[in-house]
Image: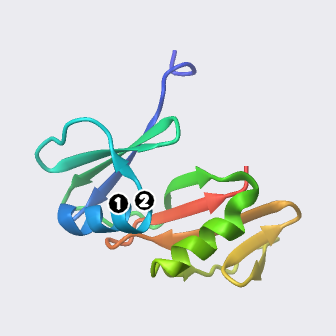
Amino acid sequence: MLDSADALATIAVKNLNAAKTFYEGKLGLKQAGARQEGTVTYSAGHSRVLVYESQFAGTNKATAMTWLVGDQVDAVVCALKGKGVSFEHYDLPGLTLRGDVHESGAMKAAWFKDPDGNIIAVVSG
């Protein structure tokens, strides 16, 4: 039933204006469609990201959203660092940390947080 439907990443934030500065200014996302009160939707490849205000923003301690960027993980990390994004470093079994990128064989991943502490990843696909 859902195997042919598109999924929507949904990210809770406390301050929509601060989130817009991050998602538009640092990540370069463009708004998609008309903005509704307390929400903004962005285009991301063939996907959408819904950012909405919630009192529960930032309470998820796991990855909330992942971008599959193929062999561009290092380039994306470099570009985001140039915009002031800080990356998380984790001690994960089987992964080696090189700079801000975690590696295991051909797989690369890097994690960062939005202003509310939502964890976002870029991963080779």
- Residue 118 location, x and y as percent? 40, 66
**Residue at label 1?**
24
- Dot 2 alpha-carbon crowd within 10 angstroms: few under 14, some 14 to 19, many 20 or more: some
- Residue 113 location, x and y as percent? 45, 72
Q: Which mark is residue 5?
A: none
- Residue 43 location, x and y as percent? 41, 42
Residue 5, compared with residue 90, is above or below; it is above
For the question of whether residue 92 can be seen, the reply is no
State the SS at label 2: loop
Quick one: 117 or 125, which is closer to the camera? 125
Quick one: 109 or 58, which is closer to the camera? 109
Task: State the separation of the CA atoms marked 2 and 1.
Answer: 5 Å
Q: Name the kind of residue labelled 1 in the image.
A: Glu
Residue shown at the point (26%, 35%) measured from the top left: 33
For the question of whether residue 7 can be seen, the reply is yes
Left or right of 57? Residue 44 is right
Residue shown at the point (36%, 61%) measured from the top left: 23
**Residue at label 2?**
28
